[in-house]
């Protein structure tokens, strides 16, 4: 069974409504993600990198994220990495990893458009799909990918096209 590391960073995929905060904030932990996933997809390990909305990421944090992903894929016991990420800057972080990490191992970014408190929360479904891609031999050598709404996009081509639509990530000119 493939060993996949899930690196959590926060974002909407990790958010729940919080009455004290007056809105949704990142409250889901790496343990929540580990508990929610079927473990027949892969040998899954979950690691918390941060728990921030992605719009709050600094350039240093994005760089450090890419360095952590690079270290994980350099580990011979790891077959792929999935990064849960807020959608505001997901494509930029994925593209940085695509440009700066030389590996054949899959690096897959995913997130959610709805919080875990909303009806129709798609975060765990997106995460399960991302794990399936990261565990697939067909994803080797493709560079960093974005998996969202049952679609797979190359990080170099993808862009967020809408602030609320579930099918927000598109690869214009490609599909």
Image: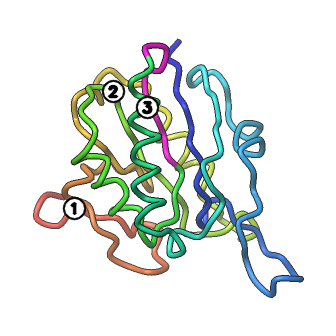
Q: Secondary structure at mark 3?
A: helix
Instruction: Identify the image's colour scheme: rainbow, by chain, secondary structure or one colour.
Output: rainbow
| Horizontal relation, residue 139 to residue 31: left or right | left
Mark linked to residue 171: 1
Q: Residue at 75% across / 83% down in the picture?
A: 23
Horizontal and vertical percent position of residue 71:
43, 31
Residue placed under numbered mark 3 in the picture: 71
Q: CA distance from mark 2 to mark 3?
A: 12 Å
Confirm whether the magenta stretch covers residue 156: no
Q: Nearer the viewer, mark 2 or mark 3?
A: 3
Residue occupied by mark 2: 105
Residue 81 on the magenta span: yes
Element assignment for label 2: loop
Quarter the C terminus occupies: bottom left
| Range shown magenta | 76-83
The mark tally for this picture is: 3
Cα gap from disc 1 to disc 3, whole angstroms:
28 Å
Distance between mark 2 and mark 1 Cα atoms: 22 Å
Q: Is residue 121 left or right of residue 72?
A: right
Classify 16 as above or below 64: below
User: Seen from this angle, which residue lies furthest right?
Assistant: 20
């Amino acid at each position: 069974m493939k060993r996949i590391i899930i690196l959590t960073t926060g974002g909407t995929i990790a958010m729940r409504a919080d009455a004290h905060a007056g809105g949704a904030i990142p409250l889901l932990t790496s343990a929540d993600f580990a508990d929610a996933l079927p473990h027949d997809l892969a040998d899954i390990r979950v690691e918390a990198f941060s728990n921030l909305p992605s719009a709050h990421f600094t350039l240093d944090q994005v760089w450090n994220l890419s360095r952590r992903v690079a270290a994980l894929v350099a580990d011979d016991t790891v077959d792929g990495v999935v990064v849960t990420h807020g959608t505001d800057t997901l494509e930029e972080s994925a593209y940085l990893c695509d440009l700066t990490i030389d590996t054949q191992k899959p690096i897959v970014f995913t997130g959610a458009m709805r919080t875990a408190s909303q009806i129709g929360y798609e975060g765990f479904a997106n995460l399960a799909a991302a794990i399936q891609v990261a565990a697939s031999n067909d994803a080797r050598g493709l560079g960093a990918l974005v998996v969202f709404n049952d679609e797979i996009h190359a990080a170099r081509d993808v862009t967020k096209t809408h602030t609320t639509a579930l099918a927000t990530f598109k690869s214009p000119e490609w599909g």
